[in-house]
Image (tube, helix red, strand yellow):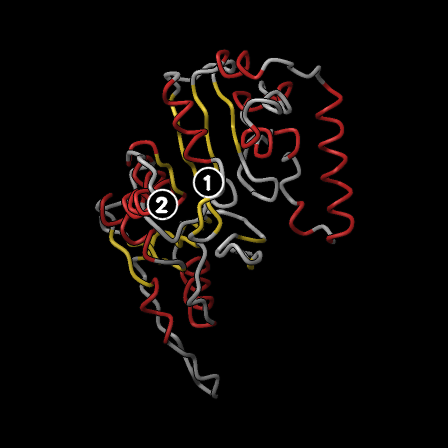
Amino acid sequence: MLSSRTVVAVASSSSFLPLSHPAAASTSASASAAAASYPFLNRRLAFSKCHTSRDHSIIPKPQRSRVMEGFKTRAAAAAPQLEDADALIDSVETFIFDCDGVIWKGDKLIDGVPETLDMLRSRGKRLVFVTNNSTKSRKQYGKKFETLGLNVNEEEIFASSFAAAAYLKSIDFPKDKKVYVIGEEGILKELDIAGIQYLGGPEDGDKKIELKPGYFLEHDKDVGAVVVGFDRYFNYYKVQYGTLCIRENPGCLFIATNRDAVTHLTDAQEWAGSI
């Protein structure tokens, strides 16, 4: 288990990555430490005190900007700045990086990333890459890192698709139960690896509901969990099917892989997220 003095979390300022763990909070004093020597880290370091409003995605945009600026101002004023970037790097063992908006935007690598990662590895630091984008499995993210010219092991990647499957496995999800997926391939692949039955996903993207008198949608009574993630094939059929499972199947779980209001699918603009 990591101590509160061994972790720095590096995240996009628009990310909804939960950074409330004490391990991330402990490094808030060093937000501007890397200004001189490591500009990439200086641009990207974001800490839990700037992410404590879990519902900021539903605050009107002008007000949300003021709220987030207030968080950042209070975080900066709460602790003295660290003058020596090397001291920050030497003081921690593990760096946790968000991916979308930090390592890449869409399929474009952000400037300074390869040099920063190489420098940290050369100094014996442990690197962990986390993403709440559930469209890919850990293996698929590994291929994306490789495509971008980055050498990252699958064991260093923690995607929300993997987290959803790992959670179900950790609670001994019944073998005779199934998961209905409102999401994409990443969730399906991780459920496969975990040995959990599922239905739904992209193949339900073309299904439609005819709202005519007497129409009745059947659903699988063996569904024990509905997992929702980012879904480019989202439709009303999926909403109704998932709703029926949650409302009518006793004990059916409702699991969301993430709560992002926006996501970075391309480097040209922000895109609507999972909510």
Q: Residue at x 75, y 40 (%)?
A: 67
Mark 1 → mark 2, Cα distance in angstroms = 10 Å
Q: Residues within 10 Å of mark 2 (few under 14, many from 20)?
A: some
Residue 214 or residue 142, whichever sits in front = 142
Q: State yes or no: discs 1 and 2 in contact (Cβ < 8 Å).
A: yes
From the viewer's perspective, is 60 left or right of 159?
Answer: right
Spot occupied by residue 49 in the image (x, y as percentages of width and height): 65, 29
Vertical arrangement, residue 108 with respect to residue 45, above or below: below
Vertical arrangement, residue 226 with respect to residue 10, above or below: below
Amino acid marked by disc 1: Ile
Residue 41 or residue 167, whichever sits in front = 41
Label whose residue precedes the other's in the sequence (1 or 2): 1
Spot occupied by residue 56 in the image (x, y as percentages of width and height): 67, 45
Displayed quadrant of residue 194: top left
Q: Which quadrant is home to the N terminus?
A: top left
Instruction: Indicate which disc residue 103 carries.
Output: 1
Q: Residues within 10 Å of mark 1 (few under 14, many from 20)?
A: many
Q: Give the residue pinned by disc 2.
A: 148
Q: Residue at x 56, y 22 (%)?
A: 37
Spot occupied by residue 105 in the image (x, y as percentages of width and height): 49, 49
Displayed quadrant of residue 42: top right
Residue 183 or residue 143, whichever sits in front = 143
